[in-house]
Amino acid sequence: MAEQLTRFIASRTVSIFGDRIADLALPLAIISVTGSASKAGVVAATLQAPRVLAALHAGALVDRVPRRKLMIGADLIQGLAYIVIGLEISVGGARWIPLVMVALIAGMAETVFSLAAASYLPQIVAKERLVRANGWLEAADAGATLTGPAVGGMLLQRLGTMPALAFNSCSFLVSAILLRRLPDTRPRGPRHEAGLLLGARLLLSRTDQLALLVGSVYMQLLASCALLVFFVRAKDDLDLASGVIGLVASAAGVGGLASSLIIARLVERRPWWMVLAIALTVNAVGVGLLGVFTHIVLLAAAVAVLDGASALCFIIASATRQRITPGEAIGRLTAASGAITSTVRVLAVAGIGVLVDAFSASTTLFGLALIGAPFILAVTAYGSIVSRQRTHATATAAKESQ
């Protein structure tokens, strides 16, 4: 079991490292070629669109097809897609239709992979170790984040778009090779059409799942928009070179490693809603600071805080959902949750470039920080209700025992 988890984490680390290079290289390359933050935002939104358009069907697929095979196939498709995207930006002039079409294919493959990976982990890790296992995965993410953006910035600055995105394609190939040695899992779930809605029904009928959903919406909103807006501010307002932007973005890995390896272990026995509410608050503060600071050291510190809080949110939300969700339905529930959060994410990413163009990057970052208040209050309110219910239950049990 430990060997399987190690191989799984290794495949994710390689793939995420390539993703972090592309996360920086892709929007900066589009902005450099077209001069449009809006186009960069639309391409980013297209990559996320399948999480909404195909989520329920992808979730049902994940709950009845061997998840290892799905992950390998999705890796290979994404690798090819990023080669084509790189060629279009480098040679084709970043035209709308080719970029959007290939980004949609890459996004569909990424949707299937992420659902399959989230559903596969509980099958190779015991429930009581899910927080730590997700922490190790997030630590791998943080390690890739620590180096990936810097490498991406340097590749983009010195070699151009194609080498940067080709590196991401190679990472998908290596990931697929590593996944080949993992065992297949054959989940059993409803095969009829109504089974597609099982995850949505379970999600909407339980208050704990709803509270996780609320926290996940804000977490994903910041994950999709914050760094994109910061990249625009760093390039246009602060006039930082791509390599410097990459180094600043790499500081996210420091915060992610701290949360994954240290903080997650310290809080794994605390009420999950309390940890999630605090982490969301720190998230909001971090994105606000990105709109204030101008010195690269302070910007790097803000990025580290932001990613550290995001990592903790991801670990707690993922482990809690995997622990409280039936194994035969986790693919569909994760898909239903992802469809909702991604709807918000796609709309936000598609519109964030317009807001930056209409106002400013700093103003947009402040707005992202302020809108976190209702999400944080909702998670806190759920925790208050749970606490009162437990207190009442304890008092009732005490009276009955007397």
Image (cartoon, rainbow, N blue to C red):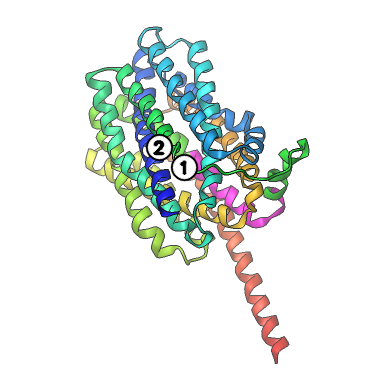
**Residue type of the residue flagged with mark 1:** Leu
Q: Quadrant of residue 357?
A: top left
The disc at residue 321 is none
Does residue 170 sit above or below 400 in this rendering?
above
**Residue type of the residue flagged with mark 2:** Leu
x and y, in percent, of residue 17 in the image: 34, 35
**Are there few (<14), some (14-19), or many (20+) residues within 10 Å of tag 2?**
some
The disc at residue 182 is 1
In the image, 99: left or right of 168?
A: right
Does residue 248 sit above or below 124 in this rendering?
above
Does residue 141 sit above or below 57 in this rendering?
below
Q: Residue visible at 48% across and 22% down? A: 43
Is residue 320 one of those drawn in magenta?
no
- Tag 1–tag 2 contact (CB < 8 Å): yes
Q: Residue visible at 54% across and 49% down? A: 215
Q: Nearer the viewer, residue 278 or 132?
A: 132
Residue 285 seen anywhere in this rendered image of the structure = no
Q: Residue visible at 47% across and 35% down? A: 224
Q: Which residues are magenta?
A: 204-221
Residue 108 seen anywhere in this rendered image of the structure = yes
**Are there few (<14), some (14-19), or many (20+) residues within 10 Å of tag 1?**
some
Q: Nearer the viewer, residue 370 or 83?
A: 83
Does residue 319 sit above or below 248 in this rendering?
below
Residue wearing tag 2: 178
x and y, in percent, of residue 2 in the image: 41, 54
Q: Residue visible at 46% across and 20% down? A: 81
Is residue 209 one of those drawn in magenta?
yes
